Amino acid sequence: MENCEKISFEALRNAEIEASEKNVHISSVAKPDGGELNIITEQQAMSLVRRRPINAHKGTFGKLICVTGSERFPGAAQISSLAALRSGVGLVKVFSTPLSCHALAVNAKEATLFPCPTDKHGFIYPDDDTLSELIRSVKTSSAVLIGCGLGTNDGSLMMLEAVLENAGCPIIIDADGINLVCRRIELLRKARTEVILTPHPAELGRLVGVSLDETVNNRYRLSKELSEQYGVTVVSKSCATVIVSNSGDCVLWFGNDGLSKGGSGDLLAGLISSFAAQGLTAQSSAILGCAMLGLGCEAASRELSKTGMLASDIINCLPKLFKKFERA
């Protein structure tokens, strides 16, 4: 792309379309409150990939706890867990329903599993033993992911509260975890550590209480307000993804419309959680996770087509992407 432009943040929606249609490269975004948001380059993102020491062991790369999946949505737990495993985390422990755990035992053999009781609809409804095990586990983990395919019943809410009140490590809240927070936004104040939220536009709108149209046209401002009010990192997902945190704000422009399918959000949540478990900051975890998702999407679509590719195909591209940045 030879042409280079700066755009206002208000014009971001149209620029997302025009950039692909006119082959225009957008180098920075003008913020509504003045200044600019730089668009993260591949080189900047990949500089965050950590070198793996020769004398490393599985504890070196962190322990991730995932509270994900249900009898209705077992794929969400599989995709997020596999994404985390394929992006370098040392250990993954998944709290999910029996059916979901059975599928994980086949497709994510490296994960350890804790099958949880369910309600009549197939969503987690924890007993005392389950809550005790979850609390013990999050206290010794290096990151926690909650929400992918979880459902929004009272049992899921109990699991979320237990995580927020007891985890001393980064907490990544995605999908139904965000929907639970929308009902009880004050729960974010219970967290004793940094929290990363990964809303798409509709979820962001529900979090801040505005319409979808207003959210789409004001994603940066609303994300900034949410971040500042609750002290969270916000990964506002769309064609261009906006990351807002107390460490700074930026925009990422990787990927294509091959991501417009179920499972892409679960994949991103697994990536971000893996990097957080490995010790990256919330902002760096979000940047690297979004970049790997987008670059993996581009690689998968080149091989399979944007129409035919699936989120799970991106997982298979991750090893080759990481290989570019490991020691020879």
Image (spheres, grey):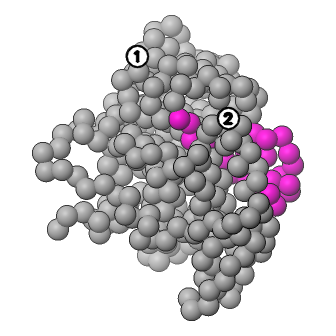
Q: Nearer the viewer, residue 114 or 174?
A: 174
Residue 178 x/y as whole percent: 66, 37
Q: Determine whether, in the image, residue 87 is placed left or right of residue 288.
A: left
Which residues make up the magenta segment? Answer: 194-219
Which residue is rendered at x = 45% and y = 26% of the image?
168
Residue 112 x/y as whole percent: 33, 30
Query: Is residue 118 among the parts visible in the rendering?
Result: no
Residue 306 x/y as whole percent: 56, 72
Could you say which disc has been placed on residue 63 in the image? none
Q: Is residue 319 magenta?
A: no
Determine the secondary structure under disc 2. Answer: helix
Query: Up-down: is 149 above or below 234?
Result: above
Determine the secondary structure under disc 1. Answer: helix
Residue under numbered circle 2: 230
Residue under numbered circle 1: 136
Kind of residue at badge 2: Tyr
